[in-house]
Image (cartoon, rainbow, N blue to C red):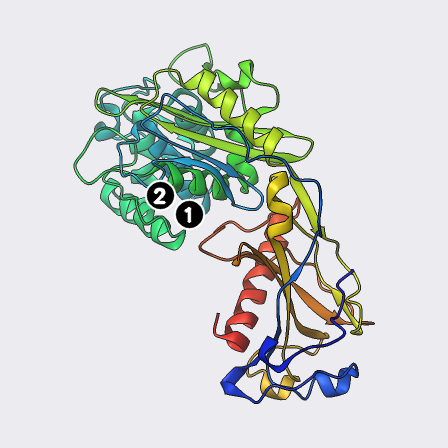
């Protein structure tokens, strides 16, 4: 339950446009006549048994990152924002951009440029045609550079046009340490990313069911128009065979980038993704990183959907969970934010009973929020709102397409109301 303080002092309440502070009454009608109101943060989980900070995690990587896919929290980072070469990890962006901009059953024709592409290859023939979906399997399982170029030309018109889409997506996702020069990852000036950016990109991509299905596939067969036998592509990602629950995502190597790897795993419905750049012992390091995340940062339920807020005729409109280690639980606080009636809400539609939100803060930093509604309202289906800088992907349940649309609407409402 969210408990209302018995005594609320004026310096604990802040009003939009510098409105004068005063004590909130319990009556909802009077609440709705007030300006935007932020109640001071209160503990969420209370005093609990705490343990020492999780043990130090080390890797052999030049840079590393570990992310909780659902919440977008970076659990571990070492040189996480350092801009480095990423080799074929590039193809994570290539794949998600192609999925979002292309049509999976379109036939992709292999040009002379794609046919001649150096490095790892599917050995596609010049003029050969293959569905975009099958070519994406070849791209992600066998890291075909010829497939990367063919996909880029098909979706973007030219390879350069597709790279523009890749960089636009990086900006959209807030990947501030990332820039692409090609769709395959061969070493090039101006082609780089960071471990943290690759972790955030991967978390975003894994919310796409087509991407997630492709990268967890161990073996894919595809029609071969040039021979009597089919293409047979085994996934280069050994984590799929070595680690319990592994379900993605991509290997990479060039002479300048050295060994790069992104892996993911799901246990008990909770997914993590690990990134290492320039790591000579990546398979073992990834197993240790994933073990570390699952063991020391469990996903803690913070609030349930339709949970009552004591002292107010309000209910939460969504559940919220967040990965926390034991010692952080007492550092988690909540803050109730209320706004006045729809006449003051501008373009935001609050006719369905939306009355504000509960924000969750960890050590004073906003980590997420859930909307709150008047009791008796018909609650729309939506996901938890996450701060953009923390989790560009937000939470994505099974019906991700529908829920992500509502998340966008909810973000628009918050922007209209709070200038967020």
The kind of secondary structure element at disc 2 is: helix
Where residue 377 appears, x then y in whole percent? 78, 71
Q: Which residue is mark 1?
A: 101
Position in image of residue 88 (x %, y %): 33, 28
Total of numbered circles in the picture? 2
Of mark 2 and mark 1, the one earlier in the sequence is 1
Q: Residues within 10 Å of mark 1 (few under 14, many from 20)?
A: few
The residue shown at (39%, 15%) is 281
Residue 222 visible from this viewpoint: yes
Q: Residue furthest left?
A: 189
Dot 2 and dot 1 residues touching (CB under 8 Å): yes
Q: Eyeballing the image, is 106 above or below 318?
A: above
Which quadrant, please, contains the N terminus?
A: bottom right
Q: Is residue 27 left or right of residue 190?
A: right
Per the model, the C-alpha gap separating discs 2 and 1 is 7 Å
Residue under pointer 2 = 155
- In the image, what residue occupies the spot 66% across and 77% down? 350
Asked if one can make out residue 247 in the rendered structure from this viewpoint, the answer is no
Give x and y (percent) for residue 278: 31, 24
Crowd around label 2: few <14 · some 14–19 · many ≥20 (10 Å):
many
Q: Is residue 323 above or below residue 272?
A: below
Q: Nearer the viewer, residue 183 or 250?
A: 250
* SS at badge 1: helix
């Amino acid at each position: 339950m969210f408990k209302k303080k018995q005594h609320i002092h004026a310096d604990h309440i802040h009003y939009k446009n510098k409105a004068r502070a005063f004590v909130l009454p319990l009556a909802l009608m009077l609440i709705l006549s007030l300006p935007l109101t932020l109640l001071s943060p209160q503990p969420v989980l209370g005093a609990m048994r705490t343990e020492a900070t999780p043990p130090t995690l080390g890797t052999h990587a030049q840079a590393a990152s570990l992310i909780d896919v659902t919440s977008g929290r970076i659990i571990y980072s070492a040189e996480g924002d350092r801009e480095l070469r990423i080799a074929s990890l590039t193809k994570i962006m290539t794949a998600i951009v192609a999925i979002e901009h292309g049509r999976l059953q379109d036939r992709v024709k292999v040009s002379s440029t794609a046919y001649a592409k150096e490095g790892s290859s599917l050995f596609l023939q010049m003029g050969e045609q293959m569905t975009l979906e099958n070519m994406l399997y070849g791209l992600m399982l066998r890291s075909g550079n010829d497939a990367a170029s063919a996909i880029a030309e098909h979706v973007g018109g030219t390879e350069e046009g597709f790279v523009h889409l890749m960089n636009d997506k990086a900006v959209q996702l807030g990947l501030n340490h990332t820039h692409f020069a090609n769709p395959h990852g061969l070493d090039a000036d101006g082609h780089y990313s960071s471990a943290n950016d690759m972790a955030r990109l991967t978390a975003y991509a894994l919310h796409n069911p087509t991407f997630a299905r492709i990268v967890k596939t161990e073996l894919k067969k595809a029609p071969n128009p040039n021979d009597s036998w089919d293409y047979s592509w085994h996934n280069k990602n050994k984590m799929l065979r070595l680690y319990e629950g592994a379900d993605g995502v991509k290997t990479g190597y060039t002479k300048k980038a050295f060994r790069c790897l992104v892996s993911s795993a799901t246990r008990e419905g909770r997914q993590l993704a690990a990134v290492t750049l320039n790591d000579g012992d990546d398979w073992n390091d990834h197993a240790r990183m994933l073990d570390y995340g699952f063991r020391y940062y469990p996903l803690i339920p913070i609030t349930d959907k339709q949970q009552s807020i004591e002292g107010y005729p309000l209910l939460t409109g969504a559940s919220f969970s967040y990965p926390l280690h034991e010692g952080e639980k007492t550092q988690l606080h909540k803050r109730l934010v209320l706004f006045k009636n729809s006449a003051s809400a501008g373009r935001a539609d609050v006719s369905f009973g939306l009355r504000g939100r509960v924000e969750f803060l960890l050590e004073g930093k906003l980590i997420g929020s859930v909307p709150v509604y008047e009791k008796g309202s018909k609650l729309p289906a939506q996901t938890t709102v996450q701060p953009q800088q923390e989790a560009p992907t937000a939470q994505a349940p099974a019906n991700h397409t529908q829920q992500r649309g509502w998340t966008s609407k909810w973000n628009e409402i918050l922007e209209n109301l709070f200038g967020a």
